[in-house]
Image: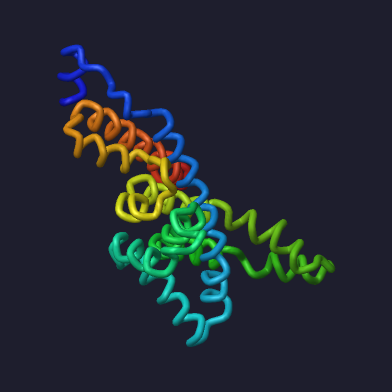
Amino acid sequence: WWVVRGRSGGARRSRVVDLPDAAWSSAWIGVLAALVTVAVVLPVAAASVRRRGRAITFVGIVVTSGFALPGIVIALACVQVFVGTPLYQGFGVLVASYVLHFGGQAFGPSAAAVAAVPGRYDEAARLLGAPRWRRWWRIDLRLMTPGLTAAGGLVLLSVLKELPATLMLRPIGFDTLPTRIAATVDAALLVDAGELSLVLVALSAVLTWALVIRRMDHRG
């Protein structure tokens, strides 16, 4: 409503709003966080499925419990640990906070992807003399790709809308759609805030369709 009313009334976009840059920043940091999160969570998920034990169960609980914590709690913890170090306000700490917070979202789909790999395929390849790394790369990973893609998609969607951790841990000058929305609302630039919000909703809708709805249609 604010976008239609403002633009039809001749309102111009503020110079402080760089919509393409904010959208690009949100996209690439989300993809990076999704890839790192899946890479970190996958070994834990595989161990929880194939090597059950108290230690593995405990690690799985630790991984999933991060999603129950508010983002600002994880951000404050990262500030407490890294403030005063060269890592503070770097992309490494920012991505690490995403992994801690959203690892629980990736854990379930990753474990399901591991459990869906038939053991007879790996056994047949082993009997044919294929080394473990080749079996994992040529068989396991390919069969797990749909589930791991869903896991990464959930993380990506969450990172796109995450504000507290991004606001507190981002490098100076790095803006995503949520941080720009917060800044424009604070500055009473409601038309610009509405425009940024529409882009964020559109990105989320496209990703939801691509990663969830389309997959359900294919299964049906």
Residue at image position (26%, 39%) is 183
Locate the C terminus by quadrant: top left
Q: Kindly tell me whether residue 153 is visible in this rendering.
A: yes
Examine the image and state in which quarter residue 13 appears.
Answer: top left
In this figure, which colouring scheme has been used for the structure? rainbow
How far across and how far down the image is residue 153, in percent?
A: 45, 49
Q: Is residue 54 above or below residue 22?
A: below
In-front residue for pair 116/184: 184
Locate the N terminus by quadrant: top left
The count of marks equals: 0
Residue at image position (49%, 42%) is 28
In-front residue for pair 118/61: 61
Point out the residue furthest to the right here. Answer: 129
Decide if residue 93 is on the left or right side of residue 114: left
Q: Kindly tell me whether residue 37 is visible in this rendering.
A: no
Decide if residue 126 is on the left or right side of residue 158: right
How far across and how far down the image is residue 123, in percent?
A: 72, 71
Decide if residue 192 is on the left or right side of residue 21: left
Q: Is residue 17 above or below residue 214?
A: above
Residue at image position (27%, 28%) is 195
Examine the image and state in which quarter residue 164 appears.
Answer: bottom left
Point out the residue furthest to the bottom here. Answer: 54
In-front residue for pair 215/176: 176
How far across and how far down the image is residue 3, in percent?
A: 21, 23
Q: Is residue 29 above or below residue 7?
A: below
Q: Is residue 98 above or below residue 66?
A: above
Point out the residue furthest to the front here. Answer: 84
Residue at image position (48%, 63%) is 85
How far across and how far down the image is residue 30, in percent?
A: 45, 47
